[in-house]
Image (spheres, rainbow, N blue to C red):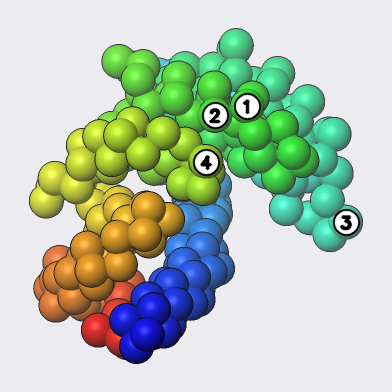
Amino acid sequence: MSDIFQEVDEELRAERARRLLFRYGGWLIAAAVAVLAATGAFEYRQWRQHQADEKLATRYLDAVHAATAEPRDTKQAMAGFAAIIPEAGPGYRDLASLQQAALQAETGHLAEALAIWDRLANAADTDKPLARLAALLSVQHQLDSGDPAMLTSRLEALEAPDDPYHALATEMRALLALRLGKTDDAKKIFSSLSHDGTAPPGLRQRAGALLAELGG
């Protein structure tokens, strides 16, 4: 009988940890996108001077403003990003596509968002950090319902030490383990993350907190 109560207790702790990871992991990725949105126009103008002019930069920033202002004008933002994509070079095109996908997901059009993220992740001319971010966002939005084998494969591809999002990918693999009822595997991943000196301090702290939540 004690084994049954122990199993129930572990499942409850796993569910609490899963909810926490969704809550804070989602905010972290949203912050990454926000940083790209805020700095991307300037950086890509420096890196790709021959592909972006002042007019295009202004249009992109106008669309970002429409997407982030209070109150937000989603319709105007979507129209602005959609107009930029076919005209711009890879830099602004891909940033506008990321913004477009985020808005699609937020407004309930997940299939459309996934199509954009997957296209960016697989296109040969997408800047590598943006391609990796697109792949990570695609996985994040399928963690609750996507095919586990597919998600595992995509996360493993993002966990190379030189990948800019390797720690976040590892954190998502722990979340996937919780979804599959593999609490011990999740504990091992969180334990490893909490001691990973290459992971951001906030992520290490969160991993330690989630490990404690799971009774690790």
Q: Secondary structure at mark 4?
A: loop
Q: Is residue 209 visible?
A: no
Q: CA distance from mark 1 to mark 4?
A: 13 Å
For label 1, the SS is: helix
Q: Secondary structure at mark 3?
A: loop
Q: Position of residue 29 (x, y in %)?
A: 47, 56
- Measure the C-alpha gap from mark 1 to mark 2: 5 Å
Q: Residue at x 36, y 59 (%)?
A: 181
Q: Which is more N-terminal, label 4 or label 1?
A: 1
Q: Position of residue 157 (x, y in %)?
A: 21, 37
Residue beneath disc 2: 114
Out of 72 and 179, give the one closest to the viewer: 179
44 vs 68, nearest the viewer: 68
Local packing at callout 2 (Cα closer than 10 Å; few below 14, some 14-19, many 20+) is: many
**Of pointers 2 and 3, the one earlier in the residue sequence:** 3
| Of marks 2 and 3, the one in the foreground | 2
Amino acid type at image mark 3: Pro
- For disc 1, the marked residue is 111
The answer to whether residue 193 is left or right of residue 18 is left
Query: Viewer-nearest of labels 3 and 4?
Result: 4
Q: Amino acid at mark 4?
A: Ser
Task: Give yes or no for contact between labels 1 and 2 (Cβ–Cβ under 8 Å).
Answer: yes
Check residue 145 in the rendering and tell me which mark sits there, or answer none. Answer: 4
* Quadrant the N terminus occupies: bottom left
- Picture quarter with the C terminus: bottom left
Chain-order first, disc 1 or disc 3: 3
**Residue 79 percent coordinates (x, y):** 78, 25
Which disc is residue 197 wearing? Answer: none
Distance between mark 2 and mark 3 Cα atoms: 26 Å
